[in-house]
Amino acid sequence: MMKRTSIVQLFHGETVLFSSVLQIGDSQKINSRARVLAVQRQYELFFGNEGENIFPVFTKPIPKIQSDCRNISLQTLHQSPVISVRSIRIIAVSTAGVVHIGSTSTVDAEARIKHIRQLAPNSSEPSMGNTQTTPPMVKDEK
Amino acid sequence: MNYTVINRDVHVGDIHLIAVTSSAVFLIGDADVINLASAFDTPPESLIIGPFVPLIPGGGL
C-alpha cells in the first residue's frame, strides 16, 4: 500500500521515557514492551531483589486478534497524498507509548503494570477511613 | 468482500496531548496493522497494610 506524507509544522515534546518511541519519519515495524512493578511504601524501604516475574500479570499470555485478510480485498485511494498538522504539543510519552509522525506498517506494543501499595499498620484507626499518613505504631527494622 | 477507502484532504490544526502511555499509539500517518495490549493489575490484595516485608516469590499477589 502506498503511504501518505505527514507534514507537521511544529512539534513540542517534554518527556519520552520507559521504552517509549518518538519516531519522525517512516518505519516498517515498531515493537515496544514495558513491564512495570510499582511498589509504593509509606516509608522509604527498598529490598532490591523482590518481585521478579512472580506475578501472573507479567507472564500470562495476552490473546491477539488475528486479522484474517484472505476474504477481504482492500483498496485504498489517496486523493490527497498528505496529512498536515499545524502543531502538536505532548507533555509525556511513557510505558511503551508510541508517537509516530510518518507512516508505518506494523505496530506491536505491550505494557504490563503491577501496582502495589504498602502502608504501615495502624490499629488505632479504622482502615480505609483516612488516607492521611500518620507515624507508624511499629517502627520497621532497617 | 470488497472494501474501498478514499483518503481525501486531512488538515489538522493544533493537537495538545497530556500523555501517551501504557502502549498507546499516537500516529500521524498510515499503518497496515496495529496491535496494542495493556495489562494493569492492582487488586484489593495489592493494598497491604502491615509490616514492611519483601514481596514473597511465588506469592502471586
Image (spheres, rainbow, N blue to C red):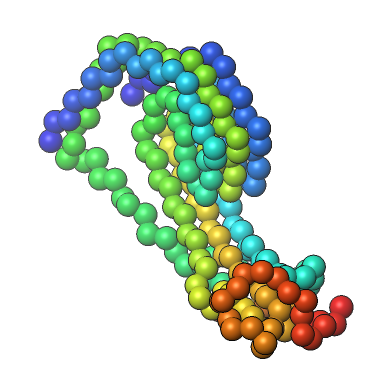
User: Residue furthest toward the bottom?
Assistant: A123
**Image: B40 above or below A1:** below
> Along the line of sight, which residue is nearer the eye, A63 or A139?
A139
> Along the line of sight, which residue is nearer the eye, A75 or B9?
B9
Q: Residue at x 64, y 62 (%)?
A: A38
Residue B8 placement, left or right of B42: left
* Residue A83 in sight in this render: no
**Residue B12 x, y percent position in the rendering:** 41, 18
**Residue A75 x, y percent position in the rendering:** 22, 24
Q: Residue at x 35, y 17 (%)?
A: B10
Q: Residue at x 76, y 80 (%)?
A: A136
**Image: A95 above or below A132:** above
Where does the C terminus of chain B fall, quadrant-wise?
A: bottom right
Residue A119 placement, left or right of B37: right
* Residue A73 in sight in this render: yes
**Residue A93 x, y percent position in the rendering:** 58, 39
**Image: A86 above or below A27:** above
Residue A39 placement, left or right of A135: left
Where does the N terminus of chain B fall, quadrant-wise?
A: top left
